[in-house]
Image (tube, grey):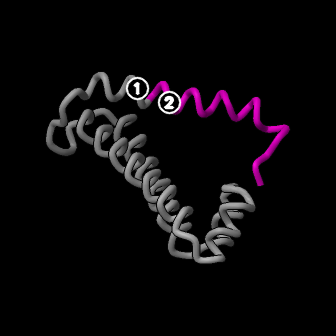
């Protein structure tokens, strides 16, 4: 078993759970986690848009968590593990690098 993949899968699962918290607890959580004032306001107004967007993010992060656990040998084998891990890694790296460019222009 690969410890790094288990850690990665666990962290992705934690982040997915935090996104579920945003859906459940609403605007204050959207603000705290930096989703932006517009998402927080829409959530407080009862709009379904923040819930849909956040649900898609939860689904994606949960899938990524499953792929990490699958590659680590913790759960059953999923298809295209190698390709999926490469794409997931690329997306996380791109998101991290983009953060450096967006740090001077925060969304919230």
Task: Using residue 87 as the reference point, say whether residue 107 is left or right of it.
Answer: right
Regarding mark 1 in the picture, which secondary structure is present there?
A: helix
Q: Which residues are magenta?
A: 89-108
Residue at 20% over, 37% down? 73
Query: Separation of disc 1 and disc 2 at Cα?
Result: 6 Å
Q: Which labelled disc corresponds to residue 87?
A: 1
Q: Which labelled disc corresponds to residue 19?
A: none
Residue at 71% over, 64% down? 31
- Label 1–label 2 contact, CB within 8 A: yes
The answer to whether residue 54 is magenta is: no
Task: Using residue 92 as the reference point, say whether residue 100 is left or right of it.
Answer: right
Can you give x and y, in whole percent of width and height, for residue 89 in the image? 45, 28
Pointer 2: what residue? 91
The vertical placement of 103 against 35, above or below, is above
Regarding mark 2 in the picture, which secondary structure is present there?
A: helix
The answer to whether residue 91 is magenta is: yes
Residue in front for this viewpoint, 55 or 72: 55
- The quarter of the picture where the N terminus appears is top left
The vertical placement of 39 against 66, above or below, is below
Residue at 66% over, 61% down? 39
């Amino acid at each position: 078993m690969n410890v790094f993949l288990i850690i990665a899968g666990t962290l992705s699962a934690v982040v997915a759970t935090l996104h579920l918290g945003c859906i459940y607890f609403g605007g204050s959580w959207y603000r705290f986690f930096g989703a932006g004032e517009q998402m927080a306001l829409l959530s407080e107004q009862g709009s379904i848009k923040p819930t849909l967007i956040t649900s898609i993010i939860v689904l994606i992060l949960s899938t990524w968590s499953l792929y990490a656990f699958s590659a680590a040998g913790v759960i059953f084998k999923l298809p295209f593990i190698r390709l999926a891990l490469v794409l997931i890694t690329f997306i996380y790296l791109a998101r991290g690098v983009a953060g450096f460019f967006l740090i001077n222009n925060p969304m919230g």
